[in-house]
Image (tube, helix red, strand yellow):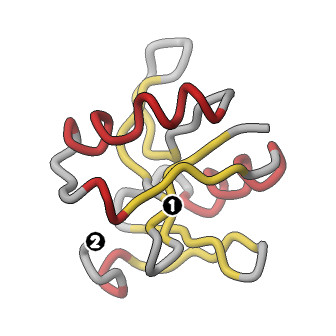
């Protein structure tokens, strides 16, 4: 199952500009294929995107369906955020985000 970056307090799933396998940029959720990869890479990935402290975030395992749903809910829109609430993907405007 894939791993994403989840904020420990808010359950927000980290999203940012990414590049797909066809070299197209899109706004979505970064994921890793294993816990080991996620744990080794997530802190430096957050720092690369200007997010500190990385200790407020952690790798979280999600099923493939939920990962796809996060990206559908984001709709390639940097003005949206997604959170994991009671096992469901919930989208919200970035203005409702606490900035973390």
Question: At x 32% / y 36%, what residue is drawn?
Answer: 45
Question: At x 43% / y 45%, what residue is drawn?
Answer: 27
Q: In the drawing, does residue 3 fall left or right of residue 77?
A: right
Q: CA distance from mark 2 to mark 1?
A: 11 Å
Q: Is residue 25 above or below residue 15?
A: above
Question: At x 20% / y 36%, what residue is drawn?
Answer: 48
Question: At x 61% / y 51%, what residue is drawn?
Answer: 71
Is mark 2 in CB contact (under 8 Å) with mark 1? no
Give the image location of residue 100, x and y in percent. Answer: 28, 71
Residue 33 vs residue 35, the one in the foreground: 35
Q: Is residue 80 above or below residue 31?
A: below
Residue 12 vs residue 70, the one in the foreground: 12
Q: In the drawing, does residue 62 fall left or right of residue 41?
A: right
Of all residues, the one furthest to the top in this rendering is 22
Q: In the drawing, does residue 86 fall left or right of residue 57?
A: right
Q: Secondary structure at mark 1?
A: strand
Mark 2 / mark 1, whichever is N-terminal: 1
Which quadrant would residue 53 be assigned to in this image? bottom left
Quarter of the figure with the N terminus:
top right
Give the image location of residue 57, x and y in percent. Answer: 40, 59
- Label 1 packing within 10 angstroms: few (<14), some (14-19), many (20+): many
**On the image, numbered disc 1 is attached to which residue?**
6
Q: How many circles with numbers are drawn on the protein?
A: 2
Give the image location of residue 55, x and y in percent. Answer: 31, 58
Numbered label attached to residue 97: none
- Label 2 packing within 10 angstroms: few (<14), some (14-19), many (20+): few
Q: Secondary structure at mark 2?
A: loop
Give the image location of residue 20, x and y in percent. Answer: 52, 22
**On the image, numbered disc 2 is attached to which residue?**
100
Q: Is residue 74 above or below residue 17?
A: below
């Amino acid at each position: 199952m894939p791993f994403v970056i989840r904020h420990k307090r808010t359950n927000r799933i980290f999203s940012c500009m990414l590049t797909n396998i066809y070299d197209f940029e899109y706004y979505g959720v970064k994921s890793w294929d294993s816990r080991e990869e996620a744990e080794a890479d997530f802190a430096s990935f957050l720092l690369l995107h200007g997010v500190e402290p990385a200790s407020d975030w952690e790798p979280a395992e999600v099923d493939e369906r939920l990962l796809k749903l996060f990206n559908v809910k984001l709709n390639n829109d940097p003005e949206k955020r997604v959170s994991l609430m009671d096992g469901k993907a919930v989208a919200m405007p970035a203005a409702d985000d606490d900035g973390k």
